[in-house]
Image (cartoon, helix red, strand yellow):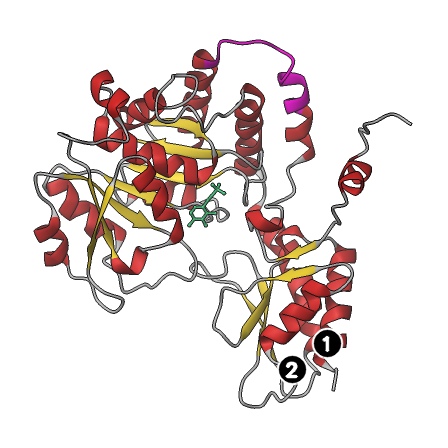
Amino acid sequence: MANFTTDASQAYQRLGVKPIINAAGSVTKYGGTRTRSEVLEVMAGAARIMVNVEDLNRKAGEEIARLTGAEAGFVCSGAAGGLVLQAAACIAGTDPVKMRQLPDTTGMKDEIIIQNMHRFPYEQAYRAGGGKLLEIGDSRYSHPWELEGAIGEKTAAVAFLCAPMTNRRAIPLDQVCEIAHSKGVPVIVDAASMLPPRANLRKFLSQGADMVSYSGGKGIRGPQGTGILCGRTDLIEAAAAHANPAQFLGRPMKVTKEEVVGLVTALSMFVEEDEEAEMRAYRALAEQVVDALSEVPGLKVTLEHDENDYLIPHAVLSFGPEWNGPSRNEIAKALEDGDPPIYLHMLGQPDELGVDPLNLTEEETETVVRRLREELTRR
Ligand SMILES: *Cc1c(COP(=O)(O)O)cnc(C)c1O
């Protein structure tokens, strides 16, 4: 028997890795999303055709600009890679002396202001790009005067997080931009998981953001390791200058030519799709879960779909005071430990469990329902 296989199931099997059911959404740890077949197809061919990668990056950027309405665009290595480039671009610009010196920022303005309510694990990417985070506000308030007061000689940028389940008492993006711009400071946005809805491709730029980072491997269903940077021409050019194929700070976050082509293909398809039809399909799967579990005594099951926390229609199970079965964590654990392992969306309230249909087939949804019923009715 040959020592390799091109059959995908066998390839995983040989490594001893079991397929799982991802009802958690576009979570990287559980596989991200299913890459579009058309994208994989074009990537397979593009990988074998040699091109000038700087030329490709520039033309792909122009296409991204066209599709997002931004001045300029760039394909980065995941939204997280985009954050590193955002920081590097704002700190060192295109000065080769400064670029080479990174991540040592001696003699450069390197402070990135962030609201306490926007602090998150990915902020390390800003530090990796040389940023020194300067926090304003607390978990309950941040005031415009705190932002004004924090901006000074050393300020490179103001970071802004657009994400589901984020505290919405932070100073809103348009106001942050107004204050930052009045002092000549750019605003860099992480909107990794905000697509769909497609309207979000333009929303943050229209609110004044100077550079926005989106994941290419989440709702767009492009190559899992890609991201999209778009925004102001000078900043995007600076970000690109730090990135592959140039040998600067961004070089270890390489994006390959076939990934660039794959991302542009995915984004073009995404933009052209009928969002209502897409949402109807997700909604139908979520409803299937809601309907199947609505009779479980003491459990509240609802369909959630809104522009802030549930961008994709979800079935949400709430374990309130009426509930006297196994705890939410016990149920989640039982599903993870079952066969096949099932991962649920755990980001809502501590007493909630979500089923995100983004990665689910009809058949997988039935399995999720069956396993939830089993564990919910276990006594
Ligand atoms: C997923 C996510 C990222 C990382 O995106 P990748 O494309 O996987 O690099 C960064 N920030 C936020 C808020 C995210 O949700």
Instruction: Kindly indicate whether the residue at mark 2 contacts the one at mark 1 (C-beta within 8 angstroms).
Output: yes
Which disc, if any, is residue 375? 1
Q: Quadrant of the C terminus?
A: bottom right
Q: Is residue 85 left or right of residue 358?
A: left
Q: Regarding mark 2 in the picture, which secondary structure is present there? A: loop
Tell me the amino acid under the disc marked 2. Pro
Task: From the viewer's side, name the closer residue of 14 and 239.
Answer: 14
For image coordinates 81% across by 27% down, the residue present is 4
Span highlighted in magenta in the image: 42-53
For image coordinates 68% across by 63% down, the residue present is 336
Tell me the amino acid under the disc marked 1. Glu
For image coordinates 26% across by 59% down, the residue present is 116
Q: Indicate whether 242 appears above or below 319.
A: above
Q: Is residue 366 left or right of residue 244?
A: right
Work out whether mark 1 precedes mark 2 in sequence or the reverse, and give the earlier one. 2
How packed mark 2 is, by other alpha carbons closer than 10 Å (few <14, some 14-19, many 20 or more), is some
Is 47 one of the magenta-colored residues?
yes
Ligand 1 contact, mark 2 (Cβ < 8 Å): no
Q: Position of residue 198 (x, y in %)?
A: 48, 44
Q: Which residue is the site of mark 2? A: 326
Question: Looking at the rendering, which quadrant does residue 288 occupy?
Answer: bottom right
Q: Position of residue 41 (x, y in %)?
A: 69, 26
Give the number of marks: 2
